[in-house]
Image (tube, grey):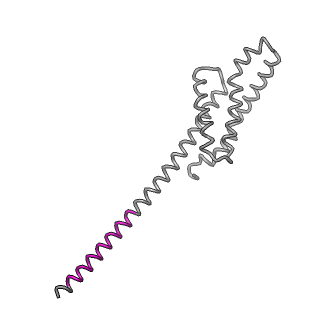
Amino acid sequence: MNTEASYWIDVALRGITAAAATAVAVYVARISRRQWQTNQEKLRLDLYERRFDIYLRVLEYHWALMEWKDTPEQLALRGPFVKAYCESKFMFPADSGIYEFLEEFNKHAICITTYKSKAELYSEVAPNKFVDSTDRKIQSLNWVLNSMDPLHAKLEPYLNFHKL
């Protein structure tokens, strides 16, 4: 009878051990799944923040371009914009058109920001070039002025946090 009792005790202990090991494995699996979900959410948030930061740098530069006076504060916005422009190539899919749009934005911004030096040079030496330079600046200002709606349309799928 002693051997029969020890047999059943052994079976019960193995069952309890197996059940405990299974419970621990299920618990660890649930923790792992939750960590994976948390990491996915963190990645989504980080990506959103990086993309939104690009948008903010473009927006700040846009505001400065509207009343460009070559002040040190305005010139300091050029570097962050160029960084945003370069990052956009890697932060958005190629078919989004965002990088190409910011490339066009950059070309118009250069026209606006270099106008003063060109105007000073051309005004006395080549009046026709001065007029052409002024026309290009006005066209660039108009392009930049009207650029926010197309930019918003291009960025919307990537900055709508609920759809990410």
Q: Residue at x 74, y 14 (%)?
A: 121
Q: Which range of residues does the magenta coloring cover?
A: 5-28
Whether residue 122 is situated above or below residue 32 in the rendered picture: above
Residue 98: percent from the left, percent from the top?
A: 66, 42
Residue 103: percent from the left, percent from the top?
A: 68, 36
Whether residue 65 is situated above or below residue 7 in the rendered picture: above
Q: Toward which corner of the image does residue 149 lie, by quadrant?
A: top right
Outermost residue toward the bottom in this view? 1
Residue 163: percent from the left, percent from the top?
A: 58, 53
Q: Toward which corner of the image does residue 24 lie, by quadrant?
A: bottom left
Outermost residue toward the left in this view? 2
Q: How many discs mark residues in the rendered view?
A: 0
Q: Toward which corner of the image does residue 124 lie, by quadrant?
A: top right
| In this rendering, position of residue 110 left or right of residue 125 | left
Outermost residue toward the front in this view? 3
Q: Residue at x 48, y 49 (%)?
A: 42
The majority secondary structure of the magenta stretch comes to: helix
Q: Quadrant of the N terminus?
A: bottom left
Residue 30: percent from the left, percent from the top?
A: 41, 63
Q: Residue at x 25, y 76 (%)?
A: 13
Q: Residue at x 69, y 39 (%)?
A: 101
| In this rendering, position of residue 118 left or right of residue 83 | right
Residue 17 painted magenta: yes
